[in-house]
Image (cartoon, rainbow, N blue to C red):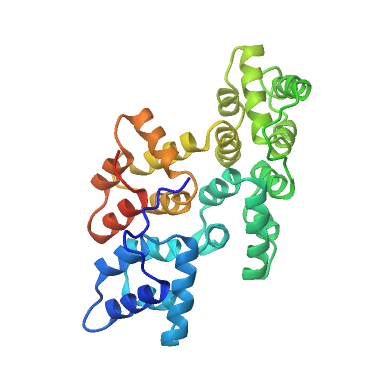
Amino acid sequence: MSTLILSPVATSPRDDAIALYRAFKGFGCDTAAVVNILAHRDATQRALIQQEYRTMYSDDLFKRLSKELTGKLETAVLLWMHDPAGRDALIVWQALRAETKNLEAATEVICSRTPSQIQHVKQIYHSKFGVPLEHDIESCASGDHKKLLLAYVRTLRYEGLEVDREITQKDAKALYKAGEKKLGTDEKTFIRIFSERSRAQLAAISSAYHDMYGRSLKKVVKGETSGLFEYALLTILRCSENPATYFAKVLHKSMKGLGTNDTTLVRVIVTRTEIDMQYIKVEYLRKYKKTLNDAVHSETSGHYRTFLLSLLGPNH
């Protein structure tokens, strides 16, 4: 569900391309105009604007934007210009490069996407970067974290809402035996169940676990695992229950304490705006008693703030 407030005036991609060209012309860039146009265009419109710009001015809008904009605003706008699957592929690719390594970001994107989204990202990743996604996970991640990520991107999970009650009970029991009941942890069982079960099935397993053993599966994961492996399992589990709650938590953490983690803030707002931002805003308010817009407003400034708040939509 998109929060994107499209332009009140119906302008054509050609009009937008002309307006952007004018904003770049002359001394300095009319950043406010650039932000005002691009923040209010959906993925299809943004792609058409890029086509028109190339046709009319024999110039790459993307390259032009990176010349004209700077800092955090540049990062946010350039990320926004991609289509969702291309953007995810780029985020993961950058997160798996030695010089920009961010395994938490790669884990968040991979473990929070649906199986069909992952398949799409894998196709683009391979064609754009000339190497399969699995290859980069293999060389960049390690241990159980690596095993889980590989299993997660290779398995075609069911995306429907039907749940098999027998499997639910069996898996809850298997997880109990693999974790709380035993000395040490049988990570293989956690990897198998978390990578093979659908979101609906995993949410049912989590609920059954609580009913059968009186403890939350989240707490068990926290007690039995650590580091990036724990982070990946918790991301899968939280997104099986409610992705909006998960992303509200990630956003809150990025703005908590001293300073702001702008990389995370931009990544989550830009990637979720056209998916489920309305729900994330509701969850944020419910959980933290403050609107997401107000939180972002107090952590950002200038055109960067305007851009992010435009993506978030009205402050309810």
Q: How many marks?
A: 0
Q: Quadrant of residue 307?
A: bottom left
Q: Is residue 139 at all visible to an observer of this figure?
A: no
Place of residue 25 in the rendered image (x, y in percent of width and height, measured from the top left): 27, 83
Q: Is residue 17 left or right of residue 105?
A: left
- Give whichever of 150, 274 is nearer the camera: 274
Place of residue 78 in the rendered image (x, y in percent of width and height, measured from the top left): 42, 66
| Residue positioned 29% across, 58% down in the render | 304
Place of residue 97 in the rendered image (x, y in percent of width and height, measured from the top left): 56, 62
In the figure, 252 relative to 173: above or below? below
Residue extending farthest front: 10
- Give whichever of 98, 117 is nearer the camera: 117
| Residue positioned 51% across, 50% down in the render | 105
In the figure, 175 relative to 264: above or below? above
Q: Which image quarter holds the C terminus?
A: top left
Q: Is residue 228 at all visible to an observer of this figure?
A: yes
Q: Is residue 56 left or right of residue 238?
A: left
| Residue positioned 52% across, 47% down in the render | 104
Q: Quadrant of residue 46?
A: bottom left
Place of residue 99 in the rendered image (x, y in percent of width and height, measured from the top left): 50, 64
In the figure, 278 relative to 61: above or below? above
Residue extending farthest bottom: 58
| Residue positioned 39% across, 34% down in the render | 282
